[in-house]
Amino acid sequence: MRVVDLIERKRDGAELPPGELRKLVLAHTRSAVPDEQMAAFLMAVYFRGLSASETCELTDAMVESGATVDLSSVGRTVVDKHSTGGVGDKVSIALGPVVAACGVPFAKMSGRGLGHTGGTLDKLESIPGFRTALSVDELVSQVREVGLAVVGQTDELVPADRRLYALRDITATVPEVSLIAASVMSKKLAAGAQAILLDVKVGEGAFTRNPCTARALAESMVQLAERARRRAVCELTAMDQPLGRAVGNAIEVREAVEMLGGGGPPDLRDLVLRSAAILLSLSDLGVGEDEGRRLAENAVASGSAMETYRRWVSAQGGNPDPGALPRAPLSAPLVAARPGYVVRLSAHGVGRVAAALGAGRERKEDPVDHACGVVCLAKLGDRVEAGDALAEVHGPDEARLAAALDRLSACYELGPEPPAVPPLVLDVVR
Ligand code: URA
């Protein structure tokens, strides 16, 4: 079929004949279909969506476009985790060590932050010496030897997604459920893990604000995993306020390490332990989620999760001592002007403030300042008195600190009554 006929069919809402979408995607990856036609096709998909079988075909074609990771030499069920991206989401940095300390190998390929959301790679690169550019062979041998590796995605994996995502980004066609599901799952399937925990963030600071869209995305991703004979569970978690307190890079790593030491903010701790329980139940340990939770709590309480963190970071060339993490030269508190309860704390706003301080980037080639960010000392529902510090900003110079404090004050709203705080885990799709 001619490409123009495929565009026309999708534009008119019809399903493509089996095999045509695969040919289209693979031809676009090898530049045999021009970007103009692919952009028009993506816009048609944006309005018409893809059927379940078209979404599977797209995912398979994207996996087929490049190399895949073979983790079979680990000899165990290797687990992985993916979040659709939020503000203050440092779960993977604590979750990997907890799960690995329970004896379950964890391998994750991760991305960088863009816009108001952070990325696990940027956070890990704030650790002095930490290498994220491991080859696939190095990744596999580290998972065999240390039980845990988190690396950047190699260029050989899923090249079709890189080309399509770049086009979606400049044609306003990123937010379409089937395209997102295929994009995320092709990378997860190519990365080789047998069991995958997905976390779709929902709310004002998330990529998906609408709970129905988030649920549809979760269901689609779990189905794609099952079809590929992988085990998958998807959590839907609230992203109306930042997760934990720290938003930045080094300050988020510090908070993840605090959690591994038995402290850290309660929401982060709860999400890490719940997520670990799910991953352990999907692993080859033969435990249910209740037993998984008990094992995860013991790994933290006994210090074995912290010990695993240190071995992992050292194996990737990093200094695991939290004291070695960079600190911004200046910091200042945001002070409450009057007493009240925190009734709104904008995750999106805090993410933007942290990015403007240097912690994030607008374009993917921009550098990040690992030391800067925001610590939200007061969270939704907390009571504060006039003069209490609501948050702290960590920045490179006085001008940016002052601008950050100004913008951060608009992220907080205080009210006379305690608000209803929604649960952190909104739903779980199995
Ligand atoms: N993250 C991805 O990896 N792909 C998308 O399409 C959207 C978010």
Image: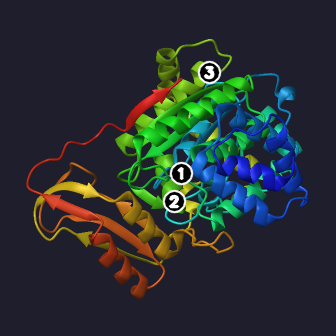
Q: Earlier in the sequence, mark 1 or mark 2?
A: 1
Whether pointer 1 and pointer 3 mark residues with C-beta atoms closer than 8 Å, the reply is no
The residue that mark 3 highlights is: 282
Q: Earlier in the sequence, mark 1 or mark 3?
A: 1
Does the Cβ of the disc 1 residue fall within 8 Å of ligand 1? yes
Question: Dividing the picture into quarters, in which one does residue 22 lie?
Answer: top right
Spatial CA span between label 1 and label 3: 22 Å
Task: Decide if residue 268 is on the left or right side of residue 194.
Answer: left
Whether pointer 1 and pointer 2 mark residues with C-beta atoms closer than 8 Å, the reply is yes
Q: Is residue 26 depicted above or below 393 in this figure?
A: above
- Residue 191 visible here: no
The residue that mark 1 highlights is: 85
Question: Dividing the picture into quarters, in which one does residue 307 lie?
Answer: top right
Q: Say what secondary structure mark 1 lies in.
A: loop
What amino acid is at disc 1? Gly
Checking the image for residue 117, the label placed there is 2
Task: Decide if residue 131 is on the left or right side of residue 253.
Answer: right
Q: Residue at x 55, y 47 (%)?
A: 84
Q: Residue at x 50, y 15 (%)?
A: 291
What amino acid is at disc 3? Leu
Q: How many numbered dots are placed on residues in this image?
A: 3
Residue in the foreground of this view, choosing between 392 and 213: 213
Q: Residue furthest bottom?
A: 399
Q: Say what secondary structure mark 2 lies in.
A: loop
Spatial CA span between label 2 and label 3: 28 Å
